[in-house]
Image (tube, grey):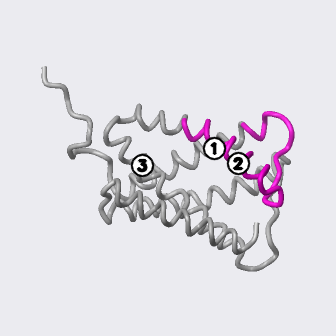
Amino acid sequence: MTTQQILLITGAYLLALVAAVFFTRATSRRVVGALAGGAIGGLVGLGMIALCEAIGLWRVPFASTPYFLLLLYLGLAISCSPIYLITWRVARRFGWRGLAVCLIVVGVVGPPRDYLYVATYPEWGAFAPGMAPVFADAATYIGLVALGHAVMRLVSGPARGGRLARQPSAA
């Protein structure tokens, strides 16, 4: 992956973040929480890339420039942040069951997305044969979303109250 490609993708995810802020009507506190979740998600994402590469599940070539890891980290952090705003709204409306569905969705959608990326751009990496890389990729997505959502909740508070929140049934 080249520096230009990382910057282009990060810019696209930055636009997605702006759209998510607008459509979720997130407060500045919630946006800060989502960015904090993204910051932790970026660190965990880099760690999982390194770990799974070390055990041979996939290969991601890194450029030898000193700023490549920083750009990749920023790209990961910014790409995760809109997801946390969406999971906040889902959790606010549907509770923990809605959040569980979001985790299942990212675990199912994430690996085919990544396999499509490396099929389209083989210079971005490669997966080892078998199902182990698929399960590791799915677990990484689920972990990133769960951890980032938890950090956002710690920073911004729980998704309670408001007109989109789950209302107790009137008996």
Q: Give the distance between the C-alpha atoms of the residues marked 2 and 3, in whole angstroms.
A: 21 Å
Within-10-Å neighbours for mark 1: few <14, some 14–19, many 20+: some
Q: Give amino acid for label 2.
A: Asp
**Contact (CB < 8 A) between labels 2 and 1?**
yes
Local crowd size for mark 3, using a 10 Å CA cut-off: few (<14), some (14–19), many (≥20): many
Residue at position x 65%, y 40% from top?
138
Q: Which residues are magenta?
A: 105-134
Tell whether 141 sits left or right of 58. Answer: left
Give coordinates of residue 72: x percent, y percent.
66, 67
In the image, 74 versus 46, the foreground residue is 74
> Which residue corresponds to mark 1?
110
For mark 3, give the secondary structure.
helix
For marks 2 and 3, the one nearer the N-term is: 3
Separation of residues labelled 3 and 1 (CA atoms): 16 Å
Q: Label 2 vs label 1: CA separation? A: 6 Å
Quadrant in the picture for the N terminus:
bottom right
Mark 3 in CB contact with mark 1 (< 8 angstroms): no
Where is residue 67, by image quadrant? bottom right
Please name the residue that numbered disc 2 is placed on. 114
**Amino acid type of the residue tagged 1 in the rendering:** Gly
- The label shown at residue 86 is 3
User: Given the image, on which type of amino acid does mark 3 rest?
Assistant: Ile
Q: Secondary structure at mark 1?
A: helix
- Is 82 placed left or right of 74 in the picture? left
